[in-house]
Image (cartoon, rainbow, N blue to C red):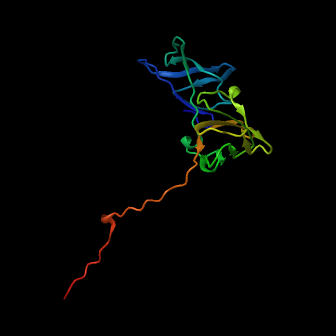
Amino acid sequence: MVCLNKISVEFNSTDANGIHHYNYTLTDESGTLMQGSQKVIVDYRLPRRVNGLAHWEVTSTDNAGWESEKAVSTQEIMYGQDEECGLAPFITIISPNYGYSKAVPYTFKVGSAEDSQCRYSLLPSANWTSMLRLSTIDNRVHTAPPFSYDKTIVYVKCNDTTNAMMHSKAFNIGVDATAPVIIATLNPLRLKIPCVQLL
């Protein structure tokens, strides 16, 4: 899982005399993301969000100077939501209140912590280009056309234009047309009966 576009990768290889370093290249559908030479672990901040699948090309060089054959692998980069990365929420829901409306139609509105362009989808795997735009005036409050969904999950992505970061958040929303009903239940185990000692 990638947080704040930071990626950490550990390379492993077998050699009787030990590995001196690894040469690596990471690319995606838009080109090269990073390349370099490292001992074992790479901690790197990607210059942009990964577009599509990520492709690794890695070779290792042992202490004698022998270079291995090139290893090639493909992986899907999973981006964590802010809370999963131990951060404060970047995207918060403004309307409907706590995600639920009393009636339809209702307004779906979110706020972003920094100036952003935001989009939404009902599909969890939707990419940025296929998502619908949320309108905004100040780049901090983002609004969708009126919703009539009884119950659904809305997936929101916001492109933080200040820090060139992409943030994502899923919201459970729906309609609650009934008021709560209070039911009082007496729990005898919670009653405290004073004890009187006679002298």
Q: Residue at x 60, y 47 (%)?
A: 100
- 168 lies above or below 56: below
* x and y percentages locating residue 196 in the rendered image: 25, 82
Residue drawn at point x = 59 percent, y = 23 percent = 37
For the N terminus, the image quarter is: top right
Task: Estimate the x, y position of residue 30 in percent, counting from the top left.
Answer: 69, 20
Residue 110 falls left or right of residue 182: right
| 187 relative position to 113: left or right | left
Tell me where residue 107 appears, x and y as whole percent.
70, 44
**Residue 88 in sight in this render:** no
| 136 vs 15, nearest the viewer | 136
Residue extending farthest right: 137
Is residue 115 rendered to the left or right of residue 17?
right
Task: Give coordinates of residue 5: x percent, y percent.
Answer: 63, 34
Residue 103 visible at all: yes
Where does the C terminus fall, quadrant-wise?
A: bottom left
The extreme left residue here reads: 199
* 46 up-or-down from 181: above or below: above
Near-viewer residue (4 or 42)? 4
Q: Residue at x 69, y 26 (%)?
A: 130
- Quadrant of the rendered image containing residue 6: top right
Residue situated furthest top in the rendering: 69
Of 56 and 74, which appears nearest the observer? 74
In the displayed structure, 88 sits above or below 22; it is below
* Residue 111 or residue 148, whichever sits in front: 148
Q: Residue at x 70, y 26 (%)?
A: 129
